[in-house]
Amino acid sequence: QLVRALQEDQLTLFAQKIQPLSATEPYPRCFEVLLRLQEEEQHMLPPGGFFPVAERYNLMGEIDRWVVRNVIKWCMEMQRSDPAWYMPLYSVNIATASLCEPQFASDVRDELQRSKFPPANLCFELAEPDVISHHAAVRAFMDTLRPLGCRVTLDAFGSSRVSFAPLKGLTFDFLKIDGVIIQNILSEPANLSKIRAIASASHKMNMHTIAEFVESDDA
């Protein structure tokens, strides 16, 4: 089913807005790209329902290629149909298998150059556990795509412990604070202090912070 979905474009992309807290933010329009698998009767299966199978059969690289290719295709079609359309920054999650496949970053680079898509409008989210466990692969990935202008997000920061040590020698544009810390921000003062410390350190390192799982205006 997954192979057929890739061949017949039975995957669907959604975009979730990353809401800036200030009108002066340099990235006023940012979206995270979300993926769903089309099933019968218009049912949409979230990634948790098919990623384990994709990982088992080594399909994650092909899925990530499909996502990048179709984000680029959709944006270029929008731009051709409406030259006044302002292209946002789109953020795409990259699986461990794709990150560790040397050819993946090269394929993305080739697709960007072929399509003439502006690389600065594409951001790649790399999970903190991958940055820790696959530091060399992360560096190679960034060395291939950052010179083009692509942006990179450190995702799930603080999911296990709060440490900036794994970032040594790497440059990220955004740091996404794990939702486990954000969820209890109103009831646990320690979490609020932790978030303030993370935001302060991030800004000193020229990284913009993003909070996951914000569930209310108060948070």
Image (cartoon, rainbow, N blue to C red):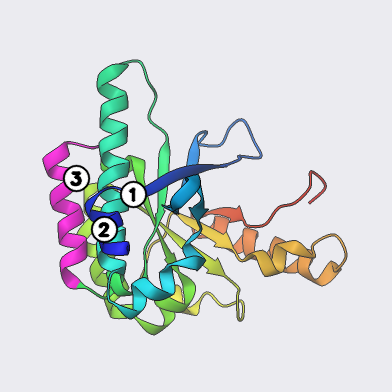
Residue 21, percent from left and from top: 66, 40
Say if mark 2 contacts mark 1, CB within 8 Å.
yes
Residue designated by label 1: 10
Residue 197, percent from left and from top: 68, 65
Earlier-in-chain disc, 1 versus 3: 1
Residue 85 vs residue 142, the one in the foreground: 85
Q: Amino acid at mark 1?
A: Gln
| Residue 136 visible within the image | yes
Cα–Cα gap, marks 1 and 3: 23 Å
Residue, x 50% and y 34% (percent of image)?
A: 29
Q: Is residue 18 above or below residue 156?
A: above
Q: Amino acid at mark 3?
A: Leu
Q: Is residue 49 above or below residue 213?
A: below
Residue 27, percent from left and from top: 49, 38
Earlier-in-chain disc, 2 versus 1: 2
Q: From the viewer's perspective, tell me whether residue 159 is left or right of residue 172.
A: right
| Residue 33 visible within the image | no
Residue designated by label 3: 112
Q: Main secondary structure of the magenta part?
A: helix
